[in-house]
Image (cartoon, rainbow, N blue to C red):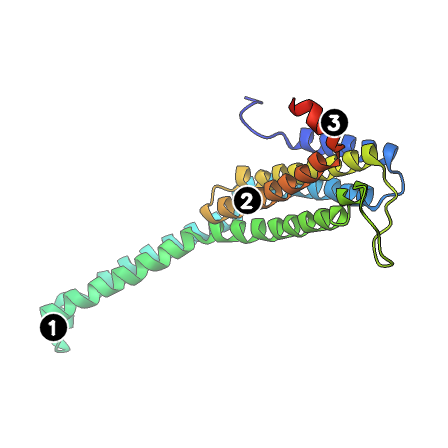
Amino acid sequence: MPYRQLDPARIINTAIVLERRIGERFPDAGIRKVCGELINLARDTRTEADRLAQPIWWLRGLVAMVIVAGALMFVFIGSFITFDRIDRVGLGIVEQVEASINTLVLAGLGLFALVRLEERIKRRAAMKGLHGMRSLIHVIDMHQLTKDPIAFASDFRPTASSPKRVLGRTDLKRYLDYCSEMLSLTGKVAALYAQAVNDRDVLEAVNDIENLSTNLSRKIWQKIMLIEPEALRRRRAA
């Protein structure tokens, strides 16, 4: 069912094509190098997501051995420590039952912790990868930060510290559009972790990254809408 899951190969191919498009229009721009990092991140994420989607067999084997060893220990202890022997050391029936319940509760908690160990290991690995994507999103945002359409206003007067405005209206729109596409692709790369690891914390982290990329992309499109000349916007509104 290829249309029910994200295909990492298609995401990587889309990023490669985007990097090529940026290079053809802005060959010396730093955003091209950022897109190259996005490609590398997507490839690393595909490898890591494939690994996390597989069971950790050695850990499951170790947990099974611990469970079997614990069960054998209980059987062994129960075979020679009986209630008759406990009575001889002065413990009543209430103390016997309480000690048995405490032992069972502690054993159950330990068993639960062992079973959840694989989930915690995968969650930690996914969170580490998602942290890098969040950083990349902010790097993309930094590259479009000074690309302000206010420079095209007729009454705009630059200062000595103003950034250099080397892009025309059309090129600036394409530049901002490329940034928006990169943000969207980063969100899709993050979703590969949610697809591989069915964990609530991972899902929440992925949603946070997608919300962050969507909010920044929305701000970029507000800039794009401001690039059009006022007369053109009025004609379109009419």
Say which amino acid is labelled 2. Answer: Val
Return the x and y of residue 98 as percentages of the image width and height: 17, 67
Residue on which disc 2 sits: 206
Q: Is residue 51 visible?
A: no
Residue 168 in which image quadrant: top right
Residue on which disc 3 sits: 232
Q: Around disc 3, counting alpha carbons within 10 Å, would you say few (fewer than 14), some (14 to 19), or many (20 or more)?
A: few
Return the x and y of residue 197 as percentages of the image width and height: 51, 42
Image quarter (top left, top right, bottom left or bottom right) of the N terminus: top right
Instruction: Choose the circle earlier in sequence order: 1 or 3.
Output: 1
Q: Is residue 94 left or right of residue 37?
A: left
Return the x and y of residue 66 as percentages of the image width and height: 41, 56
Q: Specify the label residue 87 is tagged with.
A: 1
Say which amino acid is labelled 1. Answer: Asp
Residue 38 in which image quadrant: top right
Residue 48 in which image quadrant: top right
Q: Nearer the viewer, mark 3 or mark 2?
A: 3
Measure the C-alpha gap from mark 1 to mark 2: 58 Å
Q: Around disc 1, counting alpha carbons within 10 Å, would you say few (fewer than 14), some (14 to 19), or many (20 or more)?
A: few
Are the residues tagged 1 and 2 within 8 Å (C-beta)?
no
Residue sitting at 48 percent across and 41 percent down? 198
Does 85 appear above or below 206? below
Q: Specify the label residue 169 is tagged with.
A: none
SS for callout 3: helix
Q: Is residue 65 left or right of residue 230?
A: left
Return the residue nearer the eye: 155 or 187. 155
